[in-house]
Image (cartoon, rainbow, N blue to C red):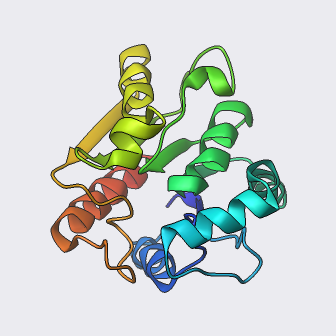
């Protein structure tokens, strides 16, 4: 059993994020899902990003870091899109990290350190034609560089253009891709000791 901190995306702690966490729990894993938006959810990605801008991306990330400080240190850090920032930062900087699952996002490793930490496996998942992942901020390039830098990194690309394809409560949900992402996630968590 792994203990996971799962951070939501820019639309907030949606029913789809909760449902994903429940799937991991049903497989026997302990999953914590902090609400970085303090109860706010948004119908569109643009509205959620506007809230994050007003609140401050740094403040949102700090909420995620603070939520993890209340838990032990032998954690897997997972995040959807915006939630990938605190997940990646903690996986790279917090002693005892057991792994990272980055869904729909990845920033350059240099954002949080000189190299990906030894002994911390990581998976990155995104759609191959998602403009948020493949074009705008260079997430795909960062993910490829991460995979090239360590044998413990895996990159999974799914056919399609949707950004938040694993959230079953959103119109962007892709059932087949989400099922494969979930299976790969559970396989990853089953290997965590």
Does residue 95 lie above or below 53 as drawn?
Answer: above
Count the labels in the image: 0
Does residue 45 lie above or below 185 as drawn?
Answer: below
User: Residue 152 location in percent, x, y?
Assistant: 40, 27
User: Residue 49 location in percent, x, y?
Assistant: 61, 62
Does residue 13 lie above or below 135 as drawn?
Answer: below
Tell me if 19 is positioned left or right of 158 in this view: right
Q: Residue at x 78, y 62 (%)?
A: 54
| Front in this rendered view, residue 14 or 184 | 14
User: Residue 137 location in percent, x, y?
Assistant: 48, 36
Tell me if 78 is positioned left or right of 33 in this view: left
Tell me if 105 is positioned left or right of 158 in this view: right
Residue 117 in sight: no
Q: Residue at x 59, y 56 (%)?
A: 83
| Front in this rendered view, residue 60 or 116 | 60
| Front in this rendered view, residue 57 or 26 | 57
Tell me if 152 is positioned left or right of 68 in this view: left
| Front in this rendered view, residue 175 or 90 | 175
User: Residue 23 location in percent, x, y?
Assistant: 39, 76
Does residue 184 lie above or below 88 as drawn?
Answer: below
Residue 115 in sight: yes
């Amino acid at each position: 059993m792994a203990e996971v901190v799962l951070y939501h995306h820019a639309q907030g702690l949606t029913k789809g994020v909760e449902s994903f966490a429940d799937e991991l729990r049903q497989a026997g894993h302990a999953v914590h899902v902090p609400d970085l938006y303090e109860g706010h959810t948004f119908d569109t990605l643009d509205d959620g990003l506007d809230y994050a801008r007003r609140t401050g991306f740094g403040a949102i990330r700090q909420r995620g870091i603070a939520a993890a400080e209340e838990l032990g240190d032998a954690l897997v850090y997972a995040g959807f899109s915006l939630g990938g920032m605190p997940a990646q930062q903690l996986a790279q900087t917090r002693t005892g990290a057991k792994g990272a699952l980055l869904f729909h996002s990845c920033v350059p490793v240099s954002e949080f350190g000189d190299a990906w930490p030894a002994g911390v496996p990581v998976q990155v998942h995104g759609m191959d034609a998602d403009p948020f992942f493949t074009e705008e901020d260079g997430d795909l390039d960062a993910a490829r560089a991460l995979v090239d830098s360590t044998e413990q990194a895996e990159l999974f690309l799914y056919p399609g253009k949707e950004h938040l394809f694993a959230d079953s409560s959103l119109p962007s949900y892709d059932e087949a891709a989400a099922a494969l992402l979930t299976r790969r996630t559970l396989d990853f968590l089953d290997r965590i000791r």
